[in-house]
Image: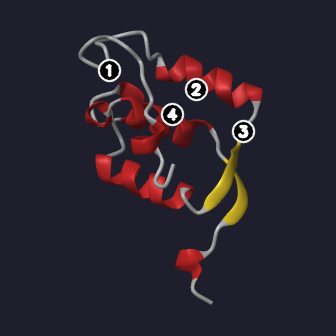
Amino acid sequence: MNTSSVTYSGLPVDTNLLVLFVVGAVNRERIESFERTSSYTKEDYKLLLQFLANFKKLHTSPHVLAEVSNLADLCGGPPMNPDGAITIHPETALPGA
């Protein structure tokens, strides 16, 4: 069985990886300098995207989403995008989206 072509139905995603996903999706250049994701690299983000691409759905809970919102603090600190906007582009954030 070739596992590289297997797609699984769903994956529960917890806070830390979801924060990495959000920060990387908004601005990959900020991953290593952002307080909550500084222990990760852009390569870690790329690996996360490759892993997530194996799943049709991502599952989480309202509590995890609230925690991600607090930890990501997308509006605090220097802007993630030069114009200060917070934008996630699905075509670049998720492979095959």
Query: Which one is in front, 8 or 61?
Result: 8
Circle number at residue 68: 2
Which residue is identified by label 1?
Answer: 80
* Cα–Cα span, label 2 and label 4: 6 Å
Residue visible at 36% across and 41% down in the picture: 39
Task: Point out residue 15 in the picture as x, y percentages from the top left corner.
Answer: 60, 36
**Alpha-carbon distance for marks 4 and 3?**
12 Å
Label 2 environment density (alpha carbons within 10 Å; few <14, some 14–19, many ≥20): many
Would you identify the image quadrant in which residue 64 lies? top right
| Residue type for callout 3 | Thr
| Residue type highlighted by circle 4 | Val
Q: Horizontal placement of 45 versus 29: left or right?
A: right
Vertical placement of 36 versus 21: above or below?
above
Residue 40: where, in percent of width, then height? 36, 44
What's the mark number on residue 19?
Answer: 4
Secondary element type, mark 4: helix
- Quadrant of the drawing holding the N terminus: bottom right
- Give the total of numbered labels: 4
Closer to the N terminus: mark 3 or mark 1? 3
- Rounded to the nearest whole Å, what is the CA distance between mark 1 and mark 4? 14 Å
The answer to whether residue 53 is left or right of residue 28 is right
The residue under label 1 is which amino acid type?
Met
Image position of 82 (left or right of 14): left
Mark 1 burial class by Cα count in 10 Å: few <14, some 14-19, many 20+:
many
- For this orientation, the residue located farthest to the bottom is 1
Q: Distance between the residues labelled 1 and 2?
A: 16 Å
Q: Kindly identify the amino acid type of the residue bearing the numbered disc 2.
A: Val
Q: Residue 60 carries which label?
A: 3
